Image (cartoon, rainbow, N blue to C red):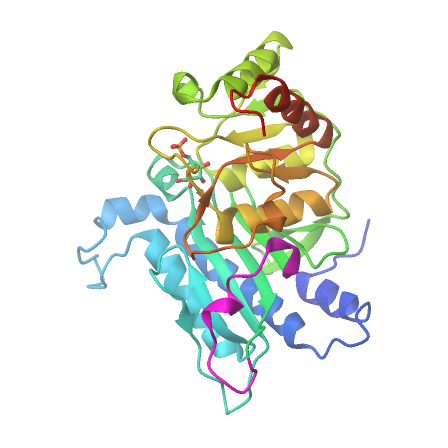
Amino acid sequence: MNRIVTLDEFIIRRQKDYPLASGELTGLLRDIGVAAKIVNREVNKAGLVNILGVAGAENATGDMVQKLDLYANEKLIECLRNSGECCGIASEEDEDFVPIPPVVGKPSKYVVVFDPLDGSSNIDVNVSVGTIFGIYRRVSDVDGPVQREDFFQKGTELVAAGYVLYGTSTLLVYSTGRGVNGFTLDPSIGEFCLSHQNIQIPSRGNYYSVNQGYYLKFDVEMRRYIDHCSDLNLRLRYIGSMVSDVHRMLFQGGIFLYPNTRKYPHGKLRLLYECNPLSFIVEQAGGRAMTCNLDRILDISPVDLHQRVTIAIGSPDMVDEMKEFVMRYKAVPI
Ligand code: P6P
């Protein structure tokens, strides 16, 4: 039987891979792990929340019942604020970035972007949701306040990215640019334990993932590619939570698409805290991630905290095939 390797032990052991590492990133990753355990505890009680009352009402103990995504947002900010390793946060739940003052005067080198609870509409029907995060080294003066440009960095500048999936089990998957590893929460000891080492995405899979309901709203090249997936008898899987769909693809292969529609002419999904971190993970696992205009997601220079992009992400052979369809059928050649 293999020895249990906890997330903390793995992170600390991997720190030795970075001779210049001084422990801040290690501390930050561990703090995100703590926040994930706290969020997991509440997500697992979500059904009770509905019994005890909806967000904004008082529950049996007189506490204010919160929407779980706001709760997750608060807990993540609280953990990162106390970590002393993060000088700023950009969250899906906050209009602007949130400066984090130094703890005991010690300046910190990193900023964190996250979607605290991606797919939160699934909570009410007990379908998996997740937290997505990315970590950048700040580019502004370390002795000054965090600046907007600290968050407007390309995905290629990520020093770490990952997600926590609150599903049939709770899994934390992350990468610091040297491969992708997964850790399953063992509730009996309250630790994330190494369960999926060096994850590699299959070169292709039997699933494609897109909201078929928008088919007639997609551009012709996307419809032709989706027709091709159907002609290949691929199976459609779409959970309505990007992190869950991408997680399935990491293990079973496939492609996830969110093209532009009339409602979302630039795509629906957010670059900073959904597409970049997940693209970083998928590329580290050997996959591809590009916009439906064939731009590599990680090469996009952000211009807004909540910028939306189109995305085609997943198995390399399938994303390459989608690219061929775009080149062949796009009405206005790229
Ligand atoms: P639609 C969840 O709200 C989310 O941001 C992603 O997690 C998910 O893939 C997508 O939106 C679902 O959007 O338009 O298909 O309901």
User: What is the x, y in percent for residue 5?
Assistant: 74, 59
User: What is the x, y in percent for residue 58?
Assistant: 18, 58
Q: Nearer the viewer, residue 121 or 209?
A: 209
User: What is the x, y in percent for residue 14?
Assistant: 77, 65
| Predominant SS along the magenta part | loop
User: What is the x, y in percent for residue 189?
Assistant: 60, 60
Q: Nearer the viewer, residue 247 or 53?
A: 247
Is residue 78 found inside the magenta-colored segment of the image?
A: no
- Image height of 321 relative to 53, above or below: above
The outermost residue toward the bottom is: 105
- Image height of 236 relative to 104, above or below: above
81 displayed left or right of 17 = left
Q: Quadrant of residue 6?
A: bottom right
107 displayed left or right of 18 = left
Q: Quadrant of residue 94?
A: bottom left
- Image height of 59 relative to 22, above or below: above
Q: Quadrant of residue 206?
A: top right
Magenta part of the protein: which range? 141-158
| Quadrant location of the C terminus in the rendered image | top right
Q: Nearer the viewer, residue 154 or 237?
A: 154
Residue at 64% x, 49% y: name it: 280
Residue at 62% x, 20% y: name it: 325
Residue 173 visible, this orientation: yes
85 displayed left or right of 201 = left
Residue at 39% x, 28% y: name it: 261
Label tally = 0
Ligand 1 shows up in which quadrant of the image? top left
Is residue 143 found inside the magenta-colored segment of the image?
A: yes
